Amino acid sequence: MDPEELRRFFDLRQEAWNRRDPDALVAGYVYDAVIESPAFGVVRGRPAIEEQYRSWFRTFPDFTFTREDLLIDGDHVAQTARCTATHSGEFMGLPGTGRRITIAAALFFRMKDGFILQERRIYDFTGFLMQLGILKGKLR
């Protein structure tokens, strides 16, 4: 894919995020894609990726993913985003708390034939868990 096609691909992904549409999001992966995520570990294959999105949207039904930057280098894409949500459903054994979370994220993709082959998500998972109340901490 040329850079313009990749931009359009990621514009469509942003629209799917806006709709919280797991079917549209998972359609962008090759069948045996791999995601590395602090929250879900290593997720392999479209069926598992689809369940990961469905689980996320059950837990955070108002999840908002706002793309900030998109950097393209051949078949590699880096994306920064800001995410906000309300913890409404069970997560890591903790029932919904009603707490709002905000995280900044960096996502790195390797593309193949117009689809995502690999995705690596990086964000402050400790800060995320503290916002949910799963971890306790004290700021100085």
Image (cartoon, rainbow, N blue to C red):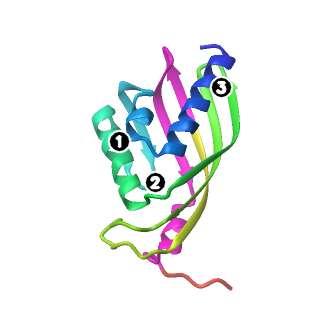
Nearer-N-terminus badge (3/2): 3
Residue 46 visible at all: yes
**Residue at label 1?**
43
Kindly identify the amino acid type of the residue bearing the numbered disc 2. Pro
* On-image quarter of the N terminus: top right
In the image, the segment drawn in magenta is: 108-135
Residue 42 located left or right of residue 17: left
How many numbered marks have been drawn onto this rendered protein structure? 3
Instruction: Identify the residue shown where x is 30% and y is 70%.
Output: 93
Of 47 and 127, nearer the camera is 47
Q: Is mark 2 on a helix, strand or loop?
A: loop
Q: How crowded is mark 1: few (under 14 residues within 10 Å), some or many (20 or more)?
A: some
Q: How far apart are marks 2 and 1 (CA)?
A: 11 Å
Of label 2 and label 1, which has the lower sequence position?
Answer: 2
- The residue indicated by pointer 2 is 38
Q: What element carries label 3?
A: helix
Q: Quadrant of residue 84?
A: bottom right
Indicate whether residue 123 is drawn in magenta: yes
Q: Which of marks 3 and 2 is in front?
A: 3
| Residue 7: mark | 3
In the rendered structure, which disc, 1 or 3, sits on the residue that comes first in sequence? 3
Q: From this view, report whether residue 86 is shown above or below residue 11.
A: below
Image quarter in which the C terminus is found:
bottom right
Q: Is residue 47 above or below residue 114?
A: below
Q: In which quarter of the image is residue 97?
A: bottom left
Name the front one of labels 1 and 3.
3
